[in-house]
Amino acid sequence: MEKPKTPRSAKMPRASAAQAKTPAGATPVSVRRPKPRRARIPYSAEEIHEIFRRFSIQRPEPKGELEHVNPFTLLVAVALSAQATDAGVNKATRALFALADTPAKMLALGEERVRDLIKTIGLYRNKAKNVIVLSQKLVDEFGGEVPLSREELVTLPGVGRKTANVVMSMAFGVPTLAVDTHVFRIGNRLRIAPGKTPDEVEAAFLRIIPEEYLFHAHHWLILHGRYCCKARKPECERCVIADICKSLEKTCDVPAPLVELPAQVV
Ligand code: SF4
């Protein structure tokens, strides 16, 4: 059989100009690699502080909208919420969590019953499977408890970095920033934490959010995105940061009155 030819691009690269000039036996000249550039953002530190100060006045105690009774049910609810609304997940999990609020009870319930209880949620077959495998892993490897660290959380089936961050923040009070669709959009639309991937947006937000606002920032950004800076059309006339916002999609410069809103706006 004819051996496949190695494509040109896969061959060993030629020596760089710097290496080529290095005399034999001499220490090679280290070639300076440019560091990946961080996008410059059009906000001053004062403006960023003011944005989060206003969010904190609007919603002093923001709350997530996924119903849960303990870290395990939160973990399951977040895992079920991928490509589904929180309201839709809550509808299904009320009955599920009444029957099974621990990994052991979830295993006793069994995949078929779980599937039946969550069938109103998108991708319910896969999700039911994941809930059972996840419960099994928690029982086998973590004594039936939800682990605290991100490294351990992401080893659980159906749990990615976003879910891990939500659980760490809401269940254990660790200040992290989970980037969901709203947070991702706000970071890029406002040009405040731009990035091509959720990880880039997370890192960009973590660089700029003042420490005292970090704990609630995730919920503030989600709620701002869900109810004001909406995906299809931002409602800038209702926005408390309209005077500071530097979005190219902004339609109004006058900030809405800064008043406290219910923790969960529906
Ligand atoms: S002014 Fe408009 S675009 Fe800017 S954050 Fe507010 S709603 Fe979003």
Image (tube, rainbow, N blue to C red):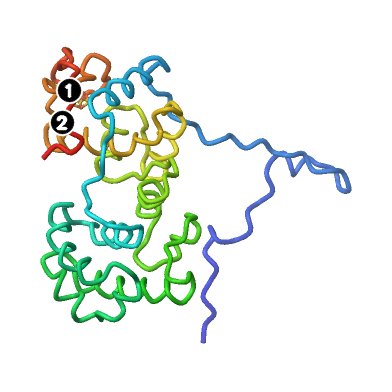
Give the quadrant of residue 236: top left
Amino acid type, mark 2: Cys
Identify the image quadrant of the C terminus.
top left
User: How far across and down, in percent of the image, does residue 85 sit?
Assistant: 16, 52
Residue 157 in percent (x, y) is at 37, 68
Asked if disc 2 is less than 8 Å from ligand 1, the answer is yes
Point out residue 44 in the picture as x, y percentages from the top left corner. 40, 16
Alpha carbons under labels 1 and 2: distance apart? 6 Å
For label 1, being within 8 Å of ligand 1 is answered yes
Left or right: 227 with respect to 217?
left
* Left or right: 90 as drawn, with respect to 210: left
Indicate left or right for 55 with 16 as reference: left
- Judging depth in this view, the residue of 63 and 247 nearest the camera is 63
Comparing 105 with 188, the one in front is 105
Q: Is residue 183 left or right of residue 23?
A: left
Q: Which residue: 34% across, 65% down?
A: 158
Crowding at mark 1 (Cα within 10 Å: few <14, some 14-19, many 20+): many
Question: Where on the picture, by quarter, is residue 174?
Answer: top left
Task: Please tell me in which quarter of the rendered image ligand 1 is found.
Answer: top left
| Residue drawn at (24%, 40%) of the image | 182
> In this figure, which residue is indicated by the disc labeled 2?
228
Q: Which numbered tag is attached to residue 239?
A: 1
